[in-house]
Image: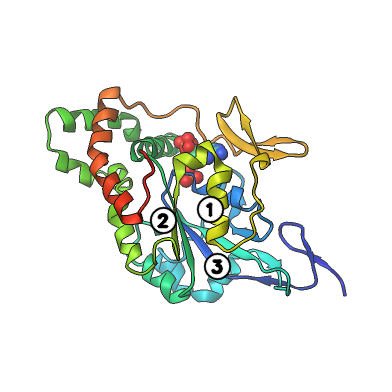
């Protein structure tokens, strides 16, 4: 027979497009990309993520009515080519679309697609995540030549905390995206915590990625392959990067940005206080405390 190489270079007799066994549902700007890239250090993991220059094409199957209407055959075509299952080895394809977390329809659609789907959610300190999303938004607005409203969001928050009503915060999408408790409740109606839905502490993942990755390997019933020495801390990047034979390999400059949109100390402390209650509700819901 002639051997084929799959998309990661492994030699195998037969190739197939495999549907995902796990999905990273969000939360956006919490480290979802780094999580999938670094999980792929385990040779049994195959990411379903098409890199297109600086852009990442996320699949958006379960949260987009249009893509969903194309059906499973369309979804399967988006999947990587992997070696067909052998007795000793099976691969788990992991898809990541952070848009799923806030979607009303995604939880039911995913459950219907596969009763046994494993769901992974990564969350960060809500203020840090919010600031990262504002920065991401500002880069987009700048690139498109739009009015850079995200750059000036500090004024909005300052005004709410000094003169306004804190209920105005719920209508702000950057704040709402950090209220993890509200959306997670909807997922936990269909996916059992720890059994089929695993929550990752994104701040711990930044500090010690190998620890959080080992927990995911257990959650996915995979052998533990990812180790401390797969990583090397890059002083310039200020993040852990992959420790490869020909040097360290860090994520691109739009992941782990140096500069973030300005938020005053006053605004940050007020936001921390505002999120505190929601963090405790979240920790209670998942039975873990992330200490933020
Ligand atoms: P910043 O660029 O604002 O620092 P996502 O992939 O969900 O869009 O998340 C992007 C965030 O991933 C980055 O936000 C960064 O904080 C975080 N991240 C976590 N681990 C990282 C790593 N090893 N390298 C770069 N960024 C990482």
Residue at horizontal 51 percent and vertical 42 percent from the top: 205
Using the image as rendered, state which of residue 156 and residue 177 is in the foreground.
177
| Up-down relation of residue 228 to residue 81 (above or below) | above
Q: Secondary structure at mark 3?
A: loop
Residue behind mark 2: 99
Drawn side of residue 209 relative to residue 15, left or right: left
Q: Quadrant of residue 160?
A: top left
Closer to the chain start, of discs 3 and 1, is: 3
Residue 93 position in % (x across, y down): 60, 64
Identify residue for label 1.
215
Q: For numbered disc 2, what is the local secondary structure?
A: helix
Residue 8 x %, y %: 72, 57
Viewer-nearest of discs 2 and 1:
1
Upstream in sequence: badge 2 or badge 1:
2
Q: Which numbered dot is residue 160?
A: none
Which label's residue is closer to the chain start, 2 or 3?
3
Spatial CA span between label 2 and label 1? 24 Å
Ligand 1 contact, mark 1 (Cβ < 8 Å): no
Image quarter (top left, top right, bottom left or bottom right) of the C terminus: top left
Picture coordinates of residue 246, whole percent (x, y) = 77, 36
Residue 21: numbered disc: 3
Q: Nearer the viewer, mark 2 or mark 3?
A: 3
Left or right side of 73 for 98: left
Dividing the picture into quarters, in which one does residue 25 lie? bottom left
């Amino acid at each position: 027979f002639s051997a084929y190489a799959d998309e990661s270079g492994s030699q195998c007799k037969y190739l197939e497009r495999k549907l995902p066994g796990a999905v990273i549902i969000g939360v956006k700007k919490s480290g979802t990309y780094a999580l999938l890239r670094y999980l792929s250090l385990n040779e049994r993991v195959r990411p379903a993520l098409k890199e297109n220059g600086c852009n990442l094409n996320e699949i958006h199957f379960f949260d987009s009515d249009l893509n969903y209407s194309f059906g499973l055959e369309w979804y399967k075509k988006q999947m990587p080519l992997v070696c067909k299952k052998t007795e000793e080895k099976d691969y788990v394809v992991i898809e990541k679309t952070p848009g799923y977390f806030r979607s009303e329809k995604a939880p039911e659609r995913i459950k219907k697609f596969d009763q046994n789907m494993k769901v992974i959610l990564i969350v960060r300190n809500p203020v840090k995540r919010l600031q990262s999303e504002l920065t991401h938004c500002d880069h987009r607005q700048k690139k498109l030549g739009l009015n850079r409203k995200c750059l000036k969001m500090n004024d909005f928050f300052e005004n709410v905390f000094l003169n306004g009503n804190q209920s105005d915060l719920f209508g702000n999408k950057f704040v709402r995206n950090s209220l993890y408790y509200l959306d997670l409740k909807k997922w936990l109606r269909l996916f059992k915590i720890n059994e089929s839905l695993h929550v990752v502490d994104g701040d711990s993942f930044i500090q010690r990625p190998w620890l959080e990755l080992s927990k995911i390997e257990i959650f996915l019933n995979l052998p533990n392959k990812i180790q401390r020495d797969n990583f090397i801390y890059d002083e310039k990047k200020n993040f852990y990067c992959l420790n490869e034979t020909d040097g360290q390999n860090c994520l691109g400059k739009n992941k782990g940005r140096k500069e973030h949109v300005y938020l005053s100390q006053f605004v940050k402390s007020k936001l921390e206080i505002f999120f505190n209650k929601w963090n405790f509700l979240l920790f209670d819901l998942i039975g873990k405390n992330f200490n933020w």
